[in-house]
Image: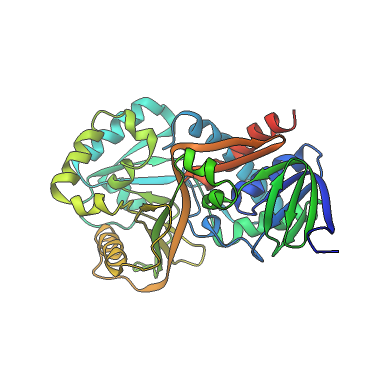
Amino acid sequence: MTSLARSLDSADVVVIGAGIVGLAHAYAAAERGLSVVVLERDEWATGASVRNFGHGCVTAQDGPALGYALSAREHWLRLAKDAGFWLGESGTVVVARADDECAVLSEFAELRGGQVRLLDAAGVASRVPVGEDVVGGAVLPLDLRVDPREAVHAIARLLAERGVRFHWGTTAHVVEPGEVATSRGRVRAGHVVVAVGHDIDRHFPELAQRKAVQRCSLRMLRVADPHGREIEHAVLTGLSMLRYAGFEACPSLADVRARFEAEQPDLLAIGMNLMLTQLPGGDLTIGDTHSYQRTVNPYRREELDERVLAETARLLGVGALTVRERWRGVYASAPEPFLVETPAEGVRVVAVTSGIGMTTALGLAPTVLDDLVS
């Protein structure tokens, strides 16, 4: 008898992928009293769910993403308490370094009311160590922070304690209605959720092509905090305004984009989102740049890291930064921010195709489960 003919396990819901999207669906299914099996090809989650800023960027979302983010926020608060991982509720400071950025924030505050609190330059400096070019900013108090190197693993441990069965180091080969063939045997399933992020094309290439799924690769770094100061907030900038959908309703955003196109077009060309968060130990996670391909180029361009370091140093008002670690993040990207498809009966392929999985997955998953197991 071959390993593929052997029965490995069975459950009401089988989830393929133990990143935050997969864990969100395992959590939602377990909350419904369903038996759950999670299959993960690696020995622990190593992808986008642990290579990010740990930023629950709630307020800057729009449309369905905002609804998912607000719902996910409540789940994050509960999970942090139940699983015992660190979570910060101090929100985000958006730093404005030009008058047009201040105008965007004023317009955003009018749109969102109490979700946005405007700051003058002194108010920004009292919260974040920044350079002298800051002219104002805003606090987004609903945003959250977690340590991505800790949180996803803690959620997996909590789910295991609650009866979710994990098969680590187990690759899903064939997904069919009622069954998943894996590298260790067959898993019978009432329902299947495929949450493999950018690797959708490994399982359903026609679906990935039809939905124009690509891999977004980005450059991120961990650096020593040059000020030795606690930064309670996540930090966004004018470049962040160009990347988050919530700001698109602000008329002055066109002025921000035009200024960058005239003064720093190279930053737009590399998809710079200048932002940072502080890890619990004090180091800063900084970044990031964005590049889109179906197959990621394996060669790293050193100038990308150099630009991230230079722009972050300028933001913080220092001459240089000490690098602790460098890494490449990869996530699924597509024209639509969320992908939920049914390639076969009882099977859902789910991906957050906009780089906001940590922010929205815990809110998205219950809606998928409502439909899948109805």
What colouring style does the render use?
rainbow
Which residue does the image show at 39% across and 33% down from the upper left? Answer: 246
Which x, y percent locates residue 255? Answer: 19, 36
Q: Quadrant of the N terminus?
A: bottom right
In which quadrant of the rendered image does the C terminus lie? top right
136 with respect to 296 (left or right): left
Instruction: Name the quadrant containing residue 62.
Output: top left
Horizontal and vertical percent position of residue 339: 53, 38
- Residue 2 screen position, x and y as percent: 81, 64
Q: Is residue 118 above or below residue 50?
A: above
Residue closest to the far front: 1
Q: Is residue 192 left or right of residue 76?
A: right
**One can see residue 359 in this view:** no
Foreground residue, 245 or 371? 371
Query: Residue 306: x and y, percent?
Result: 27, 67
Looking at the image, is 145 positioned above or below residue 72? Answer: below
Residue at 35% in and 42% down: 243
Position of residue 207 relative to residue 371, above or below, is below
| Residue at 66%, 49% in the rendered image | 23
Q: Residue at x 43, y 52 (%)?
A: 294
* Residue 316 seen in the figure: yes
Q: Nearer the viewer, residue 190 or 134?
A: 190
Q: Is residue 346 above or below residue 159?
A: above
**Is 10 situated left or right of 323 in this image?**
right
